Amino acid sequence: MSGKPAQKKASRGPDLKARPAEQPFQYPLEREFVEPDWKRLPGYRDVSREDWESALWQRRHSVKNLKEFKAVFQDLFPEDLHQSIERDMQERATMSMLMPPQMLNTMNEKNLWGDPVRRYMMPAFDERNPDWPSHPHSTRDSLHEAEMWAVEGLTHRYPTKVLAEMLPTCPQYCGHCTRMDLVGNNVPQVQKHRFETAQQDRYTTMLDYLRKTPSVRDVVVSGGDVANLPIAVLEAFVSSLMDIPHIKDIRLATKGLMGIPQHFLQDEVLKGFERLARKAIERGVDLALHTHINHANQVTPLVAKAARKLLDMGFRDVRNQGVLLRGVNTTSKDLLDLCFTLLDHGNIMPYYFYQCDMIPNAEHWRLAVHEAQQLQHDIMGFLPGFATARIVCDVPFVGKRWVNQLREYDREKGITYWTKNYRTGIEHDDAEALTRLYPYYDPIYTLPEAGQDWWRKNAAQAATASAS
Ligand code: SF4
């Protein structure tokens, strides 16, 4: 026996201290996952389930103007909101109005001023920033996609990926559309550009370009919105892509999966997608669908059903690329609500949230980069890593960058500087493409007073530089 005093034996049992703690975001979700009852809206009181679930009925009854919107909401549509949207359509809007009933049914009829879906689909004049409705560096084609067309409508911006703009229409028009230059109808503020080549000839030229460009492995088939392409046309194009041996990834881009899920539940459309999914598996191509949902209220059982059908037939994934829009989804709660709803109920993978691009009259929606960084910070750790949406800034002439990847940040003037590691399709002989700093701009009203003063003095010069 040693003379040392006996030591207290260390406990080897588990020290069970962990338990659920109070969190900034509470899970499980509070919202019940049901299709909102359309009969609560005065204009849809007599609409049968059969009509509601018909894509044709949804398209025929899509709302194209304020008179039709008023007919749906009637006395629930406040008169001052009506006037403010009307003025906006005359003086600020860059997109015309178009919404299928499915989208209207996800609005809160008791608070249309505050409703997130109404706020981005039907902006009101009083919501725009009165001093800086547009940033002086905003431009119609803010991502310079048309400058990077390899052939008309085929943007070759990244080394291994291209974007095919199949058509300039959608089943719904979003107020913040980044392709406002090309997509949709003319509005008082914007005469839209039009493709010059006939549609079928454009597709042939795109396919020819891709056949002879083996460095491209990935094609985003977009629009507009592919939900507006007849399924036979879409199938023929995508099937031809699959016949090109070096194309390994095909993503079909459609907000319509949410805006009009009824389209994706039609027999003919399902059969077309099924043939494509089968061919993709045979050829070893990853076929996925990318949608664009900005708020949890828009994920409904019909949307989930359409996504499930695609997954069951062999689509690799259905992913969501939302846009950060102030007043719509720019709290961590908004984003986590949306991501968990997509994941738990929608059969859709959260993927990206984009900063709203620098198009005209978008300032009230846009966030400063530091606000986006904070949001990225605040959503980390709640979702599985594979479903934690990345918040990205699409920097002109650079491409998507994670919001934390910036090189320098002038917080006073709200200018971030970014670098890149590849050449876009128009920089073959640009010796400085990979060393240059590329600027991006915060909304001016978010800056400190000294920065706002600087812009007041320099705005005209900046606007001229952007236009040239
Ligand atoms: S669905 Fe996409 S392309 Fe169409 S208006 Fe909306 S953002 Fe633009």
Image (tube, rainbow, N blue to C red):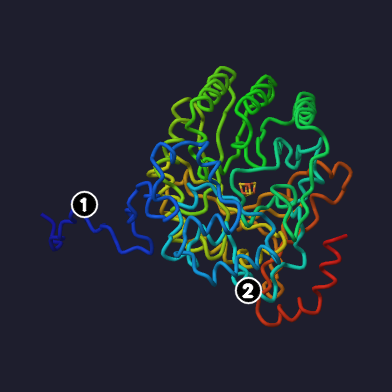
**Residue 182: percent from left, percent from top:** 74, 47
Residue furthest to the left? 1
- Of 241 and 194, which appears nearest the observer? 194
Left or right, 392 with respect to 396, comes to left
158 vs 79: above or below: above
Q: Residues within 10 Å of mark 2 (few under 14, many from 20)?
A: some
Left or right, 239 with respect to 107, comes to right
The three-letter amino acid code for the residue at tag 1 is Pro
Residue furthest to the top? 282
Instruction: Identify the image quadrant of the N terminus.
Output: bottom left
**Mark number for residue 187?**
none
Q: Residues within 10 Å of mark 1 (few under 14, many from 20)?
A: few
Residue linked to disc 2: 446
Residue at 69% across / 69% down in the picture? 133
**Residue 297: percent from left, percent from top:** 43, 53
Name the quadrant containing residue 301.
top left
- Of 299 and 183, which appears nearest the observer? 183
240 vs 150: above or below: above
Count of residue discs: 2
- Of 432 and 209, which appears nearest the observer? 209
Instruction: Identify the image quadrant of the C terminus.
Output: bottom right
Residue linked to disc 1: 14
Q: Is residue 67 visible?
A: yes
The three-letter amino acid code for the residue at tag 2 is Thr
Residue at 50% across / 56% down in the picture? 71
- Kindly state the secondary structure of the residue where label 2 is placed: helix
Q: Is residue 163 visible?
A: no
Going from N to C along the chain, the mark reached first, 2 or 1, is 1
- Kindly state the secondary structure of the residue where label 1 is placed: loop
**Residue 185: percent from left, percent from top:** 71, 49
